Amino acid sequence: MKYLDYKLNAIPSPTNKKDYSLDMYIAGSEMPKLTEPVEPVKAHYMPRAIYDQGQDGMCVDFTFRELAESFMLAELESEYVEIANGFFYGFRGERDWQGEGLVPVEVLNIWRKYGVPRRKDFNATGTYEQCKAAVEAKGKDIFNLALSQKIKSFVRLRNVHEIATYIKKTGFPVPIMFPVYSNIVEAQGTGIVPFPAGTFLGRHEVLACEIFYRNGMPRVRFQNSWNENWGDKGFGDIDPSMISESWGVWDDYPESLSDYPTEMVFQVGNKRVITDKGTVVMGEDEVPILHNDRIKLPIRKPFELIGWYVDWYQNIEIDPVTKEKTYRDYVLIHKYPSDEHTLEKFGIKR
């Protein structure tokens, strides 16, 4: 088997300050101390088979399919459910990457919003266009089939200590990305992936399942999608420093957001807002109104209901020649309390 012919199409997720962090889910006393050795740990819920992505660049799709099976295993316990391949690969948002390969955070957002179907209801492999055509052929039915397998949130794990803490806390494996170089051939038969050397071939997504020590140094063991003949019966391990991206999937919201509504229904002309956390009464100036066949909804209340901040600022700009004053109004909507740096970024002066 020529594993160097396997396509490596994992695409790095962009950095986003809005990504949830591990400390939003667990107590500060449980957060790992980076000055201490990482704790050995092993995932409890693991997929039951080593899959083979073949010559298709679907490593991200296969990895998240495996992770979804782990979640179903935890949910159903006695029953093992196989999850579809190709749904994540073929279904993308309008602003998502539309070529070969996948961006992990885009997969996470699709999984969170739409779910993922079971293998018995849908399965496709191949190029992006082939998987896209398979999804489109199913029409709206595929979304009804996927609704039962949604996640609520996900967290970017910043280092091997956080990966170990997440696995210990949840029992689930972690999708990770690492760069692949031509010397990966040395891992055949042992699964021990050496430090990068030779030609850069691309980035690969796999499912990290264990943190252990070899010769006094921590290693991350992972389940690959290159069939069970690769590495150590389909598994491999790498030095933690090689990991460029990792995510933890949570079937819950961060504790700090648990009391906020996630769904709201507004009725035009009515002060009541029906949410999944109860009913909220708004002020007279916050009521949605119908004007010239258009619905107008004041923005402060909806954003504040979900825990965001809505601030109003007014800048006064004075023309250096005419001395005329120009008043500019800004509405700043943001997830965290604003600071001077944030305001300066948008050209707002306080």
Image (cartoon, rainbow, N blue to C red):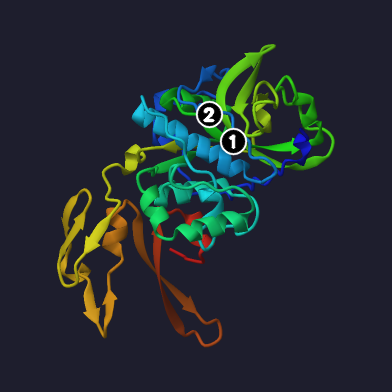
Crowding at dot 1, Cα within 10 Å, few <14 / some 14-19 / many 20+, comes out as many
The span from disc 1 to disc 2 (Cα, nearest Å) is 10 Å
**Above-or-below relation of 301 to 38:** below
Q: Position of residue 119 (x, y in %)?
A: 47, 42
Q: Quadrant of residue 175?
A: top right
In this view, the residue in front, 9 or 286, is 9
Q: Which mark is residue 176?
A: 1
Name the outermost residue toward the top.
215
Kind of element beneath mark 2: helix
241 to the left or right of 188? left
Name the outermost residue toward the right.
198
**Above-or-below relation of 264 to 243:** below
Residue sitting at 38 percent across and 44 percent down?
150
Q: Is residue 124 visible?
A: yes
Q: Disc 2 designates what residue?
A: 163
Residue sitting at 46 percent across and 50 percent down?
109
Kind of element beneath mark 1: strand
Q: Position of residue 24 (x, y in %)?
A: 40, 37
In this view, the residue in front, 184 or 232, is 232
Q: Position of residue 243 (x, y in %)?
A: 64, 34
Q: Position of residue 79 (x, y in %)?
A: 37, 28
- At label 2, the amino acid type is Ile
Q: Is residue 337 visible?
A: no
Residue sitting at 46 percent across and 34 percent down?
69
Residue sitting at 19 percent across and 57 percent down?
274
Q: Quadrant of the C terminus?
A: bottom left
Name the outermost residue toward the bottom.
322
1 and 2 marks in contact (CB < 8 Å): yes
Q: Quadrant of the N terminus?
A: top right
- At label 1, the amino acid type is Ile
43 to the left or right of 269? right
- Which badge, 1 or 2, is on the more N-terminal residue? 2
